[in-house]
């Protein structure tokens, strides 16, 4: 059974805070849930399906948040794939709705890494049960940045990609962030400022890395019959795809591609469209190299040509061929925890509805894409792609 058109995103909400020392994790989940339900015109009593990443909740996975919010459910899912988790959850929610497991799905993300002291380029906490291997990597420095730096260096070696080309991704994000009053970094930067910022993990500079923030976001997804009764723009899910890339013990390791190569192919096949049909893309941007590799793997340009594709402002709304991350993305706006894919879907919904900031709203916004990456980009990695259509 095809999942195309089996569900609609009717509510979307992004928490305005970027630092929340006075709020608990559960409180953030509840506040974003309330915001998304109000956006949809529904209440928590309408919710019968709940989705979140297990690592984003206190206590026993999602059950603690279900109890905190007083939800009565027929179905819940706490799949955790890192940064791609919430793109995955959109697909899982559509599947649950299509098979009758639930009618109204609530998806929430919340995180407090900034209040807990995590900084740009640093590794996650060593005690994180989701990553038991960190105890072996931690002594060698900021593990996450190091892994992405290896992908960047290999891309440079194999395809001639330059630091200046990587910098264009940050420049584009900053052009969009200047219009977002909640963005952590609202200043427009230049290529020179990016490449002259302090080195974090060669060849990645500080401005090649995403911000670290508190906050979160939520989505409400329903079956078509419910969506069409609500007074909201109809944003239909027409394509979803997820895939994993596992490099067994490093044998035959190839750092130049990601699981997005397969997840994108599956989403486009379901949607019945091609990459050139997409007018706006939300691309997970933990680092600038992340964006370049995803653009290649999703088919927006050929492998090895991502650096050239992003140069000269081609990702800037109103200027380039493929506007991306018009809220400023993880590079400038926010990155609540290690699962920033949620905010990618939220901005894609805004674009599909025509509700993005007027300065960055894409005029022909009928087809939009949101893509998340989880794990480490070149090795153990899960990619998830979501394609939306304004009906």
Image (cartoon, rainbow, N blue to C red):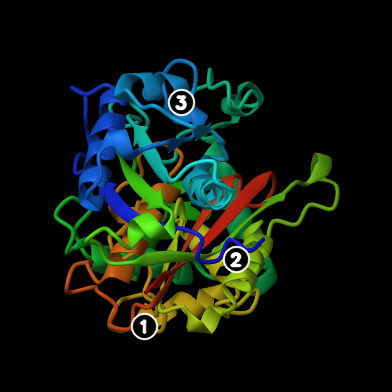
Question: Residue 262: percent from the left, percent from the top?
Answer: 68, 62
User: Left or right: 280 with respect to 99?
Assistant: left
Question: Most extreme residue toward the right, as rendered?
Answer: 251
Q: CA distance from mark 3 to mark 2?
A: 27 Å
Of discs 1 and 2, which sits in the foreground? 2
Q: Residues within 10 Å of mark 3 (few under 14, many from 20)?
A: many
Return the disc, 1 or 2, that comes first in the chain's sequence.
Answer: 2
The residue drawn where x is 55% and y is 66% is 4
Check disc 3 and report the residue beneath it: 62
Q: Is residue 229 above or below residue 111?
A: below
Where disc 3 sits, the SS reads helix
* Image marks 3 and 2: residues in contact by CB distance under 8 Å: no
The residue where tag 2 is placed is 267
Where residue 181 appears, as percent x and y from the top left, is: 14, 55
* Residue 85 in sight: yes
The disc at residue 320 is: 1
Above or below, 234 against 12 in this view is: below
Q: CA distance from mark 1 to mark 2?
A: 24 Å
**Quick one: label 1, few (<14), some, or many (20+) residues within 10 Å?**
some
Q: CA distance from mark 1 to mark 3?
A: 40 Å
Image coordinates for residue 280, horizontal then vertical, percent: 39, 74
Task: Point out the tag, 1 or 3, that comes first from the N-terminus.
Answer: 3
Residue nearest the viewer, comparing 200 with 276? 276
Q: Secondary structure at mark 2?
A: helix
Quadrant of the image occupied by residue 179: bottom left
What residue is shown at x 30% (from left), y 52% (from top)? 11
């Amino acid at each position: 059974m095809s999942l195309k058109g089996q569900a609609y995103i009717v509510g979307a909400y992004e928490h305005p805070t970027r630092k929340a020392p006075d709020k608990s994790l559960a409180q953030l989940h509840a506040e974003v849930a309330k915001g998304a339900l109000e956006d949809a015109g529904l209440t928590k009593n309408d919710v019968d399906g709940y989705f979140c990443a297990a690592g984003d909740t206190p206590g026993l996975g999602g059950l603690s948040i279900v109890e905190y919010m007083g939800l009565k459910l027929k179905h819940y899912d706490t799949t955790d794939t890192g940064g791609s988790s919430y793109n995955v959850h959109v697909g899982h929610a559509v599947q649950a709705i299509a098979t009758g497991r639930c009618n109204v799905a609530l998806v929430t993300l919340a995180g407090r890494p900034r209040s807990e002291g995590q900084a740009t380029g640093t590794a996650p906490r060593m005690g994180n049960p989701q990553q038991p291997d960190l105890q072996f990597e931690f002594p060698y420095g900021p593990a996450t940045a190091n892994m992405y730096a290896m992908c960047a260096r290999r891309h440079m070696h194999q395809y001639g990609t330059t630091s200046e080309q990587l910098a264009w991704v940050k420049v584009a994000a900053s052009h969009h962030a200047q219009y977002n009053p909640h963005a952590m970094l609202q200043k427009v930067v230049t290529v020179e400022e990016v490449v002259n910022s302090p080195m974090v993990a060669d060849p990645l500079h500080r401005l090649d890395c995403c911000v670290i923030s508190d906050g979160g976001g939520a989505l409400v997804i329903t079956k078509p019959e419910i969506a069409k009764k609500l007074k909201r723009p109809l944003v239909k899910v027409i394509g979803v795809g997820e895939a994993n890339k596992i490099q067994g013990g490093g044998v035959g390791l190839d750092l130049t591609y990601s699981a997005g190569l397969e997840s994108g192919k599956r989403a486009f096949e379901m949607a019945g469209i091609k990459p050139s049909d997409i007018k706006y893309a939300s691309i997970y941007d933990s680092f600038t190299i992340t964006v370049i590799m995803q653009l290649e793997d999703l088919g927006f340009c050929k492998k090895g040509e991502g650096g050239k594709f992003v140069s000269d402002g081609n990702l800037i709304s109103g200027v380039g061929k493929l506007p991306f991350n018009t809220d400023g993305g993880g590079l400038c706006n926010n990155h609540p925890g290690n699962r920033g894919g949620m905010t990618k879907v939220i901005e894609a919904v805004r674009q599909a509805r025509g509700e993005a900031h007027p300065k960055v709203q894409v005029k022909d916004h009928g087809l939009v894409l949101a893509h998340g990456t989880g794990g480490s980009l070149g090795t153990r990695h899960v990619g998830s792609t979501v394609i939306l259509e304004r009906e």
